Image (cartoon, helix red, strand yellow):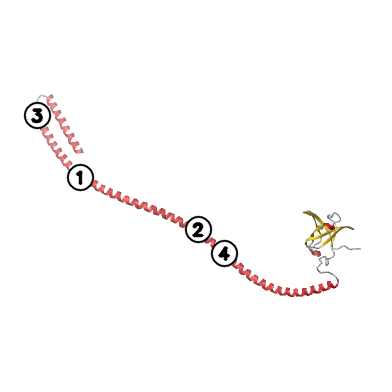
């Protein structure tokens, strides 16, 4: 029920209450009934007219309300159609948005992969650049080495020519020296035959695998060579013989030959390449 209907019902109720009040007033006041009846008839006629006016207004308002309701329903149907269209459009947009998000994720992954590839390629390029620099440096060094080697080869060829000439001279000198030694009865193949006469001291003694080794204070600068022998003594006492194992400029190491040993050899004993007899 709309507002107009409620208003009409209230108006009727008011009129009824009003009529009831009039009836009670008539019942209460018994004097001048005709005047009161005419008065009430007039009021009833006015109320009836007003009621008809209100009913007419009600019908007019109801017709207007029906038209407005129909227009509202049409508007609702139109809005419903638009809502359905918007829902469909929203679904399409949501689908497109999901596709765009998938494409964005794929693009992000592709960008990350490309970035990793770029970083890897950058590292490889740096390695290649380092290798190129190293190869260039090695090439430059090889060129410099080749030039230096060529110069050294030329120098060595010159030295070789000089050494060949010196070899010829030494061969001649060796032949002359060999002839001279043979004339004096000296065997050039005997290592002891050309040993210079030098003396020294035992500076240290050790034992290795049951063999006694001594270190002496004379060496290659004094003419000693490996496989030569030296004599060991203390004052006038002969102690034994040792074979030279290795030499250095100012010292040498020898091994005691046990079959010649005639006493305990110790640090401070004298050594000589040859003993004087008589």
Upstream in the sequence, badge 4 or badge 1?
1
Judge whether 88 appears above or below 217 on screen: above
Within the image, what quadrant is residue 7 found in? top left
Instruction: Tell me if mark 4 has few (under 14), some (14-19) or many (20+) residues whose alpha carbon lies within 10 angstroms of its own.
Output: few
Residues under labels 3 and 1: Cα distance? 48 Å
Instruction: Tell me if mark 1 has few (under 14), some (14-19) or many (20+) residues whose alpha carbon lies within 10 angstroms of its own.
Output: few
Q: Position of residue 137 (x, y in %)?
A: 59, 65
Which mark, residue 70? Answer: 1
Which mark, residue 120? Answer: 2
Upstream in the sequence, badge 3 or badge 1?
3
Local secondary structure at mark 3: helix
Local secondary structure at mark 1: helix
> On the image, numbered disc 4 is attached to which residue?
133
Please give the name of the residue rendered at 24% of the width and 47% of the height, measured from the top-left corner: 77
Apparent side of residue 115 relative to residue 84 in the rendered image (left or right): right
- Residue lying at the far left in this picture: please name it: 34
> On the image, numbered disc 3 is attached to which residue?
37
- Residue lying at the far front in this picture: please name it: 259
Residues under labels 4 and 1: Cα distance? 90 Å
Disc 3 or disc 1, which is closer to the eye?
1
Residues under labels 2 and 3: Cα distance? 115 Å
């Amino acid at each position: 029920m709309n507002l107009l209907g409620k208003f009409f019902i209230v108006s009727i109720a008011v009129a009824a209450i009003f009529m009831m009040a009039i009836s009670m007033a008539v019942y209460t006041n018994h004097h001048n009934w005709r005047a009161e009846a005419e008065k009430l008839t007039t009021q009833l006629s006015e109320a009836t007219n007003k009621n008809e006016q209100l009913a007419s207004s009600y019908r007019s308002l109801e017709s207007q309300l029906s038209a407005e309701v129909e227009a509202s329903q049409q508007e609702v149907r139109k809005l419903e159609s638009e809502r359905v269209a918007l829902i469909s459009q929203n679904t399409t947009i949501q689908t497109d948005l999901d596709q765009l998000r998938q494409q964005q994720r794929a693009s992000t992954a592709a960008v990350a992969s490309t970035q990793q590839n770029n970083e890897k390629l950058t590292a490889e390029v740096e390695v290649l650049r380092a290798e190129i620099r190293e190869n260039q440096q090695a090439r430059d060094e090889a060129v410099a080495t080749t030039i230096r080697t060529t110069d050294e080869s030329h120098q060595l060829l010159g030295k070789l020519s000089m050494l060949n000439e010196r070899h010829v001279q030494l061969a001649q000198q060796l032949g002359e020296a060999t002839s001279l030694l043979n004339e004096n009865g000296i065997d050039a193949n005997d290592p002891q035959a050309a040993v210079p006469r030098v003396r020294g001291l035992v500076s240290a003694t050790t034992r290795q695998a049951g063999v006694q080794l001594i270190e002496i204070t004379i060496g290659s600068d004094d003419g000693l060579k490996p496989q030569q022998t030296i004599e060991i003594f203390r004052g006038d006492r002969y102690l034994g013989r040792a074979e030279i194992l290795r030499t250095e400029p100012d010292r040498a190491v020898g091994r005691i030959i046990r079959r010649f040993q005639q006493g305990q050899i110790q640090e401070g004993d004298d050594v000589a390449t040859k003993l004087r007899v008589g």
